[in-house]
Image (cartoon, rainbow, N blue to C red):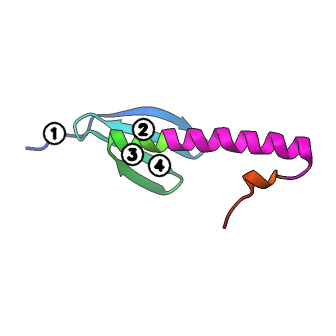
């Protein structure tokens, strides 16, 4: 018999919520109406990648404000 989900809210902010189910060992990432079920390991990998991107974005914004344009070595690629 399956145990019912035992969920714990890990974090939440405007439109984003992370919930952990101990019985399933799954983290649910809710972004608006979208929900992703991830392993705890993948959740940590995504969090690390997002933190690196956030730090790089902060640095890019500061340099853009200082130089008046994005430095060529930080140009955005499409």
**SS under mark 2:** helix
Q: Are marks 3 and 4 in contact (CB under 8 Å)?
A: yes
The residue under label 3 is 28
Q: Alpha-carbon neighbours of circle 1 within 10 Å: few (<14), some, or many (≥20)?
A: few
Asked if residue 60 lies in the magenta stretch, the reply is yes
Q: Residue at x 23, y 41 (%)?
A: 24
Q: Nearest to the eye among marks 2 and 1: give it.
A: 2
The residue under label 1 is 3
Residue 55 location (% of width, % of height)? 66, 38
Residue 14 location (% of width, % of height)? 61, 42
Q: Nearest to the eye among marks 4 and 1: give it.
A: 4
**SS under mark 3:** strand
- Tell me the number on the disc at residue 30: 4
The residue under label 2 is 44
**SS under mark 1:** loop
Q: Alpha-carbon neighbours of circle 4 within 10 Å: few (<14), some, or many (≥20)?
A: some
């Amino acid at each position: 018999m399956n145990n019912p989900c035992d969920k714990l809210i890990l974090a939440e902010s405007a439109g984003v919520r992370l919930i952990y189910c101990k019985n399933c060992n799954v983290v649910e990432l809710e972004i608006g109406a979208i929900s992703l079920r991830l392993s705890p390991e993948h959740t940590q990998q995504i969090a690390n990648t997002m933190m690196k991107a956030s730090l790089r974005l902060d640095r890019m914004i500061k340099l853009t404000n200082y130089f008046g344009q994005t430095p060529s070595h930080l140009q955005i690629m499409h």
